[in-house]
């Protein structure tokens, strides 16, 4: 079996977690960004019911949440904050029912790990919000303790002593979004996404015990959102070769056919599924462009045409809230810009590029017009860091940049998610560069220059 320590070392917090939840300078759990994905270590399907020997996990089964008040006297307060504010900031309000409450909270009251991770997420979110406490001590303790428990449970699972993979899969997703909320700048988010992929491919296809169809769909949405909107910032050594497992992608496509609307993906789940394909195409065509003797392959050209047709055909679900529909159309324009910028940078103009350049300018104008039709304080903006980053790379006029800048500032003041702050920090750096260097495909390079690796999820 793989060593839990080897597998999880980048995921595990050291004894000191964060120096600050507000300034972004120390907002990550770990500076390490190398991770071996969790693979099947031979844990039997009918594993022993007993948890492992670790003291942290002796109450995983039949956990009584009221016991936690002895060790964590602020648990009730944090749970209340989660229900009132954190869950609303995590979700974008596209549905009447918030799965961050109706799916995760019942699971938390059945499982110690999920409960602790939710409380930690609430504590971290509170520290980057206007409700921040004078000291980070409690938030740091909640996060460190929950991460330690996560490590212990993975070790027990890999040893075959406990078949608790559903809480681990859910936990890895919660951890990834907690890092986003904190404003992670060291790529810790990516480690949790990779772990989630390895765990979910074991959990989702057979829909393990205790998983309803609604929970299954939410986890597919959760992973699709996190992976698609993070891959652009991943360092080459940890990029997912195939962000979507075929079985998970098939489930997501079935959800698209059913007009699925979610609190993370709004009505644009189909576009999230296209983004990794565009990324893969861009990487392939970049290799061709570096070899002047090798033109783009027929397969690359065909794939480009198919992806463009799919994105152009996208329409918002007619029954959704108007703000969600508009956000879906903003996503559409951003995905088109991402696709088209494979061919040439958005600010590159030469004799054989005028039509392409004008097409991108029109997409930018359309995207900004759509943004102007709903307020920056609307909850749906929670999901818009990725399109704003793409659009931000494609604008050169200061007035247009002010639109994006002001929107991100309003979003941060309203939703208080750290990745909104870091998205603006990155764009401000991007905008200092010569126009010929600015492209969505250079964002990872810009992150390296700024020494920040962020997720736009």
Image: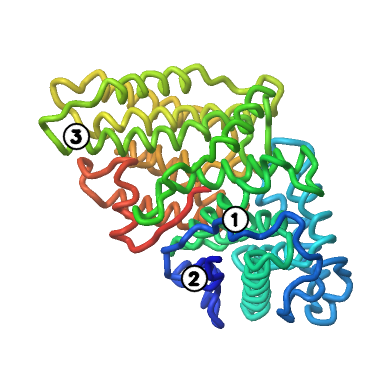
Q: Quadrant of residue 54?
A: bottom right
Left or right of 385 in this view: 431: left
Q: Residues within 10 Å of mark 1 (few under 14, many from 20)?
A: many
Residue 131 seen in this snapshot: no
Query: In this view, which residue lies farthest toward the left?
Result: 293
Residue 58 seen in this snapshot: yes
Q: Quadrant of residue 224?
A: top right
Task: List x then y, in percent, for residue 174.
Answer: 65, 57
Q: Earlier in the sequence, mark 2 or mark 3?
A: 2
Left or right of 127 in this view: 163: right
Residue bearing the label numbered 2 = 6
Task: List x then y, in percent, for residue 165.
Answer: 69, 57
What residue sits 32% from the left and 21% below the top? 359
Residue bearing the label numbered 3 = 289
Q: Residues within 10 Å of mark 3 (few under 14, many from 20)?
A: few
Question: Is 161 or 21 nearer to us in this picture?
Answer: 161
| Gap in angstroms between the C-alphas marked 2 and 3 | 38 Å
Question: Is 115 or 394 nearer to us in this picture?
Answer: 115
Are the two marked residues, 3 and 1, in contact with CB atoms closer than 8 angstroms?
Answer: no
| Gap in angstroms between the C-alphas marked 3 and 1 | 35 Å
Q: Which of pointers 3 and 1 indicates the residue nearer the eye?
A: 3
Which element is circle 1 on?
helix
Left or right of 83 in this view: 125: left
What residue sits 47% from the left and 23% below the top? 311
């Amino acid at each position: 079996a793989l060593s839990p320590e080897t597998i999880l070392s980048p995921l595990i917090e050291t004894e000191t977690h964060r120096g600050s939840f507000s300034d972004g300078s120390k907002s990550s759990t770990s500076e390490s960004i190398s991770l071996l994905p969790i693979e099947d270590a031979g844990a039997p399907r009918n594993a022993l019911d007993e948890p492992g020997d670790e003291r942290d996990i002796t109450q995983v089964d039949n956990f009584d949440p009221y016991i936690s008040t002895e060790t964590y006297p602020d648990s009730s307060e944090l749970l209340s904050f989660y229900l009132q504010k954190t869950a609303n900031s995590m979700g974008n309000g596209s549905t009447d029912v918030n799965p961050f409450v109706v799916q995760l909270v019942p699971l938390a009251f059945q499982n110690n790990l999920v409960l602790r991770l939710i409380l930690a997420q609430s504590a971290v979110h509170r520290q980057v919000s206007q409700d921040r406490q004078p000291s980070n001590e409690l938030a740091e303790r909640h996060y460190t303790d929950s991460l330690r428990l996560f490590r212990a449970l993975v070790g027990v699972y890999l040893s075959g002593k406990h078949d608790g993979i559903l809480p681990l899969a859910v936990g890895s997703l919660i951890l990834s979004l907690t890092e986003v909320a904190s404003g992670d700048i060291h790529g810790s988010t990516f480690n949790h996404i990779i772990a989630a992929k390895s765990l979910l491919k074991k959990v989702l296809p057979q829909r393990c015990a205790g998983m309803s169809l609604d929970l299954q769909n939410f986890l597919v949405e959760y992973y699709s959102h996190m992976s698609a909107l993070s891959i652009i910032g991943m360092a080459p050594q940890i990029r997912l070769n195939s962000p979507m497992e075929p079985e998970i992608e098939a489930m997501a496509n079935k959800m698209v056919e059913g007009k699925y609307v979610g609190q993370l993906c709004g009505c644009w789940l189909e576009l999230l599924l296209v983004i990794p394909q565009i990324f893969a195409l861009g990487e392939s065509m970049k290799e061709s462009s570096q070899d002047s003797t090798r033109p783009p392959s027929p397969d690359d050209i065909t794939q480009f045409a198919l992806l463009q047709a799919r994105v152009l055909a996208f329409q918002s679900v007619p029954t959704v809230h108007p703000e969600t529909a508009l956000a879906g159309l903003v996503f559409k324009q951003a995905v088109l810009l991402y696709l088209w910028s494979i061919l040439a940078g958005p600010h590159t103009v030469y004799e054989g590029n005028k039509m392409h350049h004008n097409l991108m300018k029109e997409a930018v104008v359309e995207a900004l017009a759509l943004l102007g039709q709903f307020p920056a304080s609307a909850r749906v903006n929670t999901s818009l860091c990725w399109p704003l980053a793409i659009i931000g790379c494609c604008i050169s006029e200061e007035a247009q940049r002010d639109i994006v800048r002001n929107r991100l500032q309003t979003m941060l003041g309203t939703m208080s998610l750290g990745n909104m702050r870091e998205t603006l920090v990155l764009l401000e750096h991007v905008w200092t560069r010569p126009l010929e260097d600015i492209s969505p495909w250079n964002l990872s390079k810009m992150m390296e220059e700024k020494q920040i690796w962020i997720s736009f999820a």
